[in-house]
Image: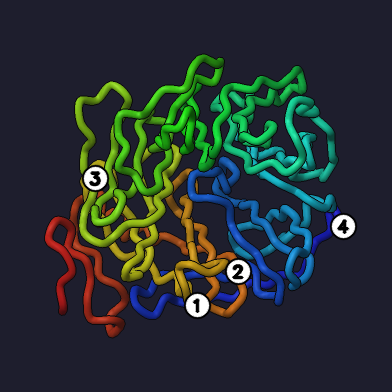
Amino acid sequence: MRGQTHNSERVFRADPRGGVMVVQLTSYPRASWNMYFEHNHFTPNSKTVIIMRQRELRPGAPADICRCDIDGHNLIQLTDDEGICGVALSRDGRHAYYLHGTTLKRVAMDTFELEEVLHVSDAQPGGVGMAGQTGDGRYLFCTMRVGDEVGLFRLATDGSGTQLLCRGSHLNHVSCDPGHDVVSFGGTINGRSRLWVIDAEGGAPREFPMQRFAHCAWLGRTGRMQGCLLPPGRAIMSMAEGDAAPETIVAGPYFWHSGASLDGEWIVADTNWPDQGLMLVHVATRSFTFLCDAGAADGDSWGGHPEPAISPDGSVVIFTSNRTGIPQVYLAYVPDEMKQALRHSLDWQGEPGVAGRHYMPRHGWVCV
């Protein structure tokens, strides 16, 4: 039920390869997962996260939004509706928003009071997903069915109304720039499958100048987009709309999904083909290091996409892994020493006696 506090399910372990402390937030036999890497998971003080979890382990079981402190305590169920589709945490951390059919609802993170905010009258049930909130908190963005197409909708958080911004045959990975009134999304419009951007106040969508991203999101409040290259590219790139060419932030492994801190200082990325673990990136020094192993058993199975996101202060990374056979949510605590080393482009090596390799920024993997 909404507001119910569950017993702590936390399990602590040191990552065997790097020594970083990782806590498994959820461990009961029901699927749990974090949201997409481009979404906001953390309250502004970086102390609480929201996650999704099924009520029971069976195909099609309803899922609820839960909140949990980063130490694994205060695991609280926030919703009890069935058919939740699309979730967003408000910028101020006070409410979790979600779609129930074509109705936008919000639940208070502390009092668990539930409100109906508005109804999207020109859409059909079965929304595809929710993006984040504008930096000023005025709007949320979501994709929902409109006839035989998908529409991008702007929803006013004060309940004053909705607007259909654009529509296409496929729209996905909607990402709201937290520092500017701009929204990005992938999809097919008028037969062109591209990465698009559109102003929050409306207007025609325009193609983003960089089209080689496999996955991408905003680089915090900087107004720049950051993302991982399509294969065979092996780099995280950054670009703003007015730039003549993209910049390489880091290169080496095949980076897969990359989320950034709110100030744009840090990026965390998972890797694939092969899986080399989660990587922590310092944007200014163009350096990165191994953070921890996600332990996902299969990149194509449920829970096999870690899709990591990093807290506003860069101290905590959230990700999903099916290492136990059931998708569960994990947090990795980023050591201050690791961040300081990357800020100075110095080597970071894990605890003595663990795996015999570490990353030397700008040089690559080195056996030691």
Callout 2 environment at 10 Å: few (<14), some (14 to 19), or many (20+)? many
Q: Determine which residue is flagged by label 3.
A: 249
At 75% across and 48% down in the image, what residue appears?
84
Tell which circle, 2 or 1, labels the residue nearer the N-terminal end.
1
Which mark's residue is nearer the viewer, 3 or 1?
3
- Does residue 177 appear in the picture of this structure? no
Residue topped by disc 4:
1
Q: Which residue is mark 1?
A: 13
Q: CA separation, marks 1 and 4?
A: 30 Å
Which callout, 1 or 4, points at the residue further toward the start of the chain? 4
Question: Quick one: label 3 or label 1, which is nearer the N terminus?
Answer: 1
Q: Assign a secondary structure to mark 3.
A: strand
Residue 275 badge: none
Residue 358 in the image, given as x and y percentages of width and height: 23, 71
The answer to whether residue 265 is left or right of residue 261 is left
In the rendered image, the residue lying farthest to the bottom is: 353
Identify the element where label 4 is drawn. Answer: loop
Residue drawn 36% across and 29% down? 208
Q: Which residue is mark 2?
A: 328
Please name the residue shown 84% across and 53% down the image: 80
Task: Categorize mark 4 by other alpha carbons within 10 Å: few (<14), some (14-19), many (20+).
Answer: few
Q: Amino acid at mark 1?
A: Arg
Q: Is residue 27 visible?
A: yes
Quadrant that contains the C terminus:
bottom left
Q: Nearer the viewer, residue 237 or 221?
A: 237
Q: Secondary structure at mark 2?
A: strand
Look at the numbered discs 3 and 4 and tell me whether their residues touch, using CB distance below 8 Å: no
| Secondary structure of residue under mark 1 | strand
Disc 3 and disc 2: Cα gap in Å?
30 Å
Q: Amino acid at mark 2?
A: Gln
